[in-house]
Amino acid sequence: MMRIDIISLLPKLLEGPFSDSILKRAQDSAKVEIYVHDLRQYGLGRHQQVDDYAYGGGAGMVMMIEPIEKCIKHLKSERVYDEVIYLSPDGEPLTQSIANGLSTQKNLVLLCGHYKGVDERVREHLVTREISIGDYVLSGGELAAAVLVDAVVRLLPGVLSDETSALTDSFQDGLLSPPIYTRPADFKGWKVPDILLSGHEEKIREWRFEQSEKRTRERRPDLLE
Ligand code: ADE
């Protein structure tokens, strides 16, 4: 079973995403264990301090190394981790291929940043990998961590009810998905393509592939390069 430990200053933000639907089922059926750790509990002193002013000045607080190191050390004392991932807009952009790779790992730590981010020494010495979910800035790493967990956990064997359905996702073959339809075949004159009603499996496969290519060419030519 895969295990994911998430370190966060706002653990409540992560309650919702993991307690419904596919992510809930994956945990209930023992495909993954997800633990959220409140970094504040590792804070310094009576006020459980977790952040401080930046050396050299400038606006914004910086997350201190000590609480983060204490938390990671505690986790590492109990098991070996494959990666300690820091969610950050300056990380490697998340792709399906990265999600596929992570889905084969056993134990992951995800570190969520806040304020101006973490002390650089956390990134140099404690983190093994930095991942961004896109070229925009979120107010913290929690939503990014939830995105990463969703993308990875749905790939674990047995998580999706129809095992082939992750294989036909957009991006899994490097192309966008073809159009899909369900009943009715004619809604106020808006018709489902005849080919899909024809029953010709081979022709339908070809049509879907052509549509995938066309859609990718039109919307995401960068994926074809
Ligand atoms: N934290 C803030 N913005 C982020 C982003 N785009 N990706 C990952 N983590 C983030």
Image (spheres, rainbow, N blue to C red):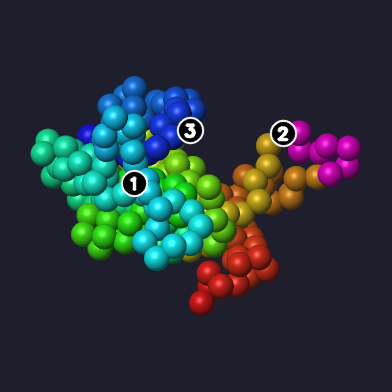
Residue corresponding to mark 2:
183
Please state which of residues 184 and 159 is positioned toward the viewer in this rendering: 159
**What kind of element bears circle 1?**
strand
The residue furthest right is: 188
Residue 148 shows up from this direction: no
Q: Quadrant of residue 40?
A: top left
**What kind of element bears circle 2?**
loop
Q: Amino acid at mark 2?
A: Arg
**What kind of element bears circle 3?**
helix
Please state which of residues 44 and 146 is positioned toward the viewer in this rendering: 44
Give whichever of discs 3 and 1 has the lower sequence position.
Answer: 3
Question: Residue 15 placed where, x, y %?
Answer: 45, 27
Which range is magenta?
Answer: 184-190
Q: Amino acid at mark 3?
A: Leu
Give whichever of discs 2 and 1 has the lower sequence position.
Answer: 1
Q: Quadrant of residue 207?
A: bottom right
Question: Residue 161 placed where, x, y %?
Answer: 42, 32
Q: Is residue 9 above or below residue 131?
A: above
Which residue is pictured at 27% across the width and 45% down the height? 68
Residue 63 drawn in magenta: no
Q: Amino acid at mark 1?
A: Leu
Residue corresponding to mark 3:
13
The answer to whether the residue bearing label 1 lies less than 8 angstroms from the nearest atom of ligand 1 is no
Q: Quadrant of the N terminus?
A: top left
* Dot 3 alpha-carbon crowd within 10 angstroms: few under 14, some 14 to 19, many 20 or more: few
Q: Is residue 154 above or below residue 25?
A: below
Which residue is pictured at 54% across the width and 50% down the height? 138
Residue corresponding to mark 1:
111
